[in-house]
Amino acid sequence: MRKIVLLLTGWMLLFNLGLTAQQHPGENANGNGHANTTGTIYGKLLDNQTGKPVEYASVALLRPDSSVMTGMLSKPNGDFNFEHISLGKYILKINFIGYEVFFKPVAITAKSNSLDAGNIKLKANVKSLAAVNVVGEKPAFSMAIDKRVFNVEKNLASIGGTATDVLKQVPSVNVDIDGNVSVRNGTPTIFIDGRPSTLTLDQIPADAIANIEVVTNPSAKYDAEGMSGILNIVLKKNKKAGINGLISAGITSLGSTNGGIDFNLRQEKFNFFINYNIRDRRSPMTSRLFRKNIGADTTTYMEQLQDGDFYRKFQTGRIGFDWFIDNRNTITISENITGGNFNRYNDQTVNESDMQLNRVRYGTGIDNTKNGFRNYTTQLGYKHTFAKEGEELTADFTYNYATGDNSSNFSLQYFDLKGNPINTPKQPQNRYGYGDGKTVYLTGQVDYVRPFSETSKLEAGLRTNTRTFDNFTSTFGQNFPSGDFTLDSALSNNYHYQEQINAAYASYTGAKNNFGYQVGLRAEQSNYTGETRLGRKESYKINYPISLFPSVFLSQKLKGDHELQLNYSRRIRRPWFRDLLPTIEYSGQSASRGNPDLKPEFTNSFELSYLKDIQHKHNVLVSLYYRNTDNAITDFYVDTTLTLNGQAQRVVLSYPINASTRNSYGAEITIRSQLTKTWDITGNFNLAQTKINASSQGNNLTNQGFTWFGKINSNTKLPWNLTLQIAGEYESRQILPQGERKPQYSIDAGLKKDMLKNKALSISLTLNDIFNSDRNLSYTTTAFSEQENYRKRLTRELRLNATWRFGKMDTNLFKRKNNRSNKDNGQEMGGDRE
């Protein structure tokens, strides 16, 4: 246990200590003109019982008035030294959790300006060690006034899944059936380890995630992108000393499998980590599109049914190391490689009926797509901590390179009611396609933090993002009666897109008594270019001037562990490349495309939050928020006729437009309660009013509605090392500019059994979506049609997973041989100073 305490405490101090204070004017000179005005103090720390060196202990040099002169952490061999110290009397203070605090008076003079403090033997503090032994486990969900952190390791429902499954469990976050994420009915920006990525949520294994950070109203330090804040996915990176890791494997009732290994080696100045995960997931899915076509003199009905499977098979690996050059400088290098295939196979049936709903013809066929991908992410980071506590400089560079390939196969043959093929007036539809694409994403950032006092600091930084995207797709349709396949330009594309975003920020934090404030300003400039290189060539170039994004945070701490905060920030949502891509995507009787004329939307976000801590067992966070958005991006539906391989197809076409305004206001309540020593509950409730004003093609569209959703997560520790978790969510009706989406809900349950010594083996059994109720049902109305769209994945799934943790925390793994040789020679490393 002592090794664990020493290691954890030492590294905690390594990143948080910084005892060096600014020297007083004239400290390095005694004013008498003598040359020897400074000296050196050095020594060595040893454990009183074992005689082994004590590494990373806090060693402070105090002035006679107990103010801090300077400080450092002891080296791996226990040595410490202070150079260029002004002549005079001082006090050595050694402090390390698990040991008694040690004081020793020292002095350096002109005659003796090099002082050896000797081997200082530290005594173990039994009471301190006992206190460390009873520290509770990290909670599944923790709240602060400005950020909430969801601990993924504590969540049973997402084990063996992907980041999409994880986010479904996070309070404040909604995820629909297609994996689209929203926070408080708005779109957030999603980062991985604080940086943009080309990975999708379904390409990130849940077992590779450490926690999810939710920042609903970020300050100027963060990217201004994201109407409703930032979700930061923090990946695991083990830093335990010695050799350790874990192996996991699982299987589900739908035939999905998963496995992974996480290995870590840390000794002295290096920390090496590597992990690998493989997923093979299968998800049956079904959909029903029912449309009423309203013509000038008649009304007809169309029903499209699709039934099939969605296969997701991929592998991901991460390797890297930290190099602790000294206790001031650290370099981190990592490489992440992900690759796999996402394939959809659908059988489809189309029924067409007259105005009395009598079927007049039907069609059958397939709608299959295959998508392969490879993703490479290289990260290089540097961190320098200054002598002054809290002052640090960090710099990092991220390189993302992703490639993909795709293929499609579509067919639809119509028949009369007797089963005879119909070739006219609707000819059989047979199409196939293939394509590929690549994305390059570069991110560079430098941040600097300069504290002025315990309550005030300045933060500043620079950042640049560059993304280049190329996509090529060729679709060939069969012509009749010749049977030849020719290129269909309406469903093909050759597209190039590039964006660059440059940013700079500065913020100042201060406080007076219990009142705190932070003011910041972020400036961002963005440039976009896009070009279609197939058929009718089109291009655009958009250069947005520098936009300013101010933020203000005011907080007041009240008596009794209360805190009140009022904040404001300006946000932006830039169109994603698929929002701008003019290429049509066609599936059955529906189509969608991008809009090259789309502009960014700007949001003014206000939030008033209240946080109450009750006896460190119950936490209540209440937030009132208001968002006003100009040029709000929303989907617009229109009836149109597409010509595909010479055939006229009437479809409902959707594409994004800029609405005039979107106003949203609401309240969110999050409560975490430790009801007993073995039972805690986290509940989240959000209600909002949203109004959308939009216009397109001469239509003025206005819609508004009241929405709410809630989540609850219960964790109970049972006898025999069992843990029971039950989680549920409900989302009310959601308004759309031309319709609505119906309510939906789901409930998950999981049971985990810890076994072996130190709970090294864990077996979990979870049932996701117990009532198989998670689905998407929406209604859309246009001038010439009424449409109902139902889509469902078979989400009820029983998952069995096992995790085995191995290894031993050992800080002296590579030093034993050297120490043994030194003992054979009759001396300790560093010499005997007594």
Image (cartoon, helix red, strand yellow):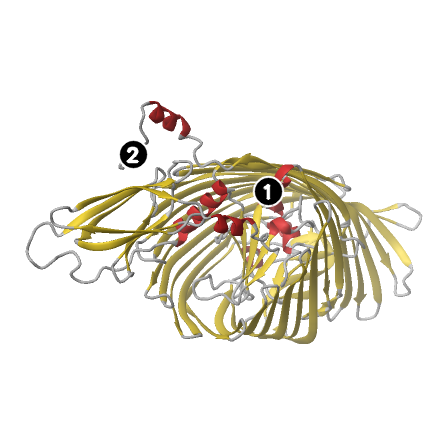
Whether residue 484 is situated above or below residue 571 in the rendered picture: above
In primary-sequence order, the first of circles 1 and 2 is: 1
**SS at mark 1 in the image:** strand
Which mark, by number, is residue 435?
A: 1
- Give x and y (percent) for residue 473: 59, 45
Task: Answer whether residue 194 is visible to the viewer in this image.
Answer: yes
Q: Quadrant of residue 31?
A: bottom left
- Give x and y (percent) for residue 500: 43, 56
Q: Residues within 10 Å of mark 1 (few under 14, many from 20)?
A: some
- Contact, CB < 8 Å: mark 1 with mark 2? no
Q: Residues within 10 Å of mark 2 (few under 14, many from 20)?
A: some
The C terminus lies in quadrant: top left
Q: Is residue 830 toward the left or the right of residue 580 in the image? A: left
**SS at mark 2 in the image:** loop
The residue sitting at 84% across, 67% down in the picture is: 299
Q: Quadrant of residue 344?
A: top right
The residue sitting at 78% across, 67% down in the picture is: 786
Q: Is residue 26 toward the left or the right of residue 329 in the image? A: left
Which mark, by number, is residue 830?
A: 2
Q: Amino acid at mark 2?
A: Gly
Which mark, by number, is residue 26?
A: none
Whether residue 306 is situated above or below residue 832 in the rendered picture: below
Q: Amino acid at mark 1?
A: Gly
- Tell which of 182 and 285 is nearer to you: 182
Mark 1–mark 2 Cα distance, whole angstroms, equals 65 Å
Task: Answer whether residue 444 is visible to the viewer in this image.
Answer: no
Residue at the limit of the structure toward the right, as seen here: 418
- Give x and y (percent) for residue 789: 76, 60
Observer-side mark, 1 or 2, equals 2
Q: Is residue 63 toward the left or the right of residue 666 in the image? A: left
- Give x and y (percent) for residue 38: 16, 51
